[in-house]
Amino acid sequence: MFVVYTMREDKVRVISAREAEDDEKRIYQRGWNEGIMKKIKNWNEIPEFETENEEREFWETHSISPDLADDFDRPAQGPMARKMREARAMVPNLDEDTFRRLIELSVVESVDPRDLITRFIADGLREEEKRAGLTNHR
């Protein structure tokens, strides 16, 4: 899946989320191979953007290096990093793959990951109460 998003203060805005087309994959790979896409190797190489158009234009010629992409699961600072640390603290025994899926869903739905955890626990509890015959609960 190909997801493009931007962060503004404490909000994540999904710009696009879809499966990349084969021709897009080939163009992207060619850009890497021919050096057309500038590889971002450090977070400090990404400027602050004044407008979304400026940001779009930047990302048309730049891409995150594979090593830096590995760092996406470990945001170091900012509002989203704090939310992810707090979400992780809420579910410390959750395996990494499930936690990653939770974060991806929170980005796609533009929902705080902590709210998703709370919602999933409440929904799961209601289902288990139904199975146990505890109908006096909501």
Image: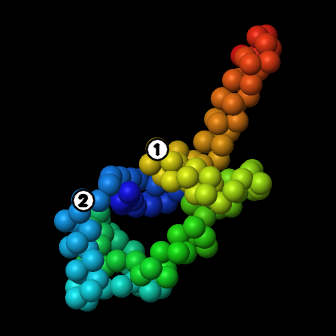
As displayed, is residue 75 above or below residue 34? above
Other residues around mark 1 within 10 Å, as few (<14) / some (14–19) / many (≥20): some
Tell me the amino acid under the disc marked 1.
Answer: Glu
As displayed, is residue 59 above or below residue 100? below
- Earlier sequence position, callout 2 versus callout 1: 2
Left or right: residue 100 versus residue 57 is right
Q: Residue at x 23, y 81 (%)?
A: 31
How many numbered markers are drawn?
A: 2
**Residue 53 got which mark?**
none
Q: Are marks 2 and 1 in contact (CB under 8 Å)?
A: no
**Residue 21 got which mark?**
2
Other residues around mark 2 within 10 Å, as few (<14) / some (14–19) / many (≥20): few
Q: In this view of the protein, which residue sits in the foreground, 2 or 53?
A: 2
The residue that mark 1 highlights is: 109
Q: Position of residue 15 (x, y in %)?
A: 33, 54
Tell me the amino acid under the disc marked 2.
Answer: Glu
Q: Position of residue 6 (x, y in %)?
A: 40, 61
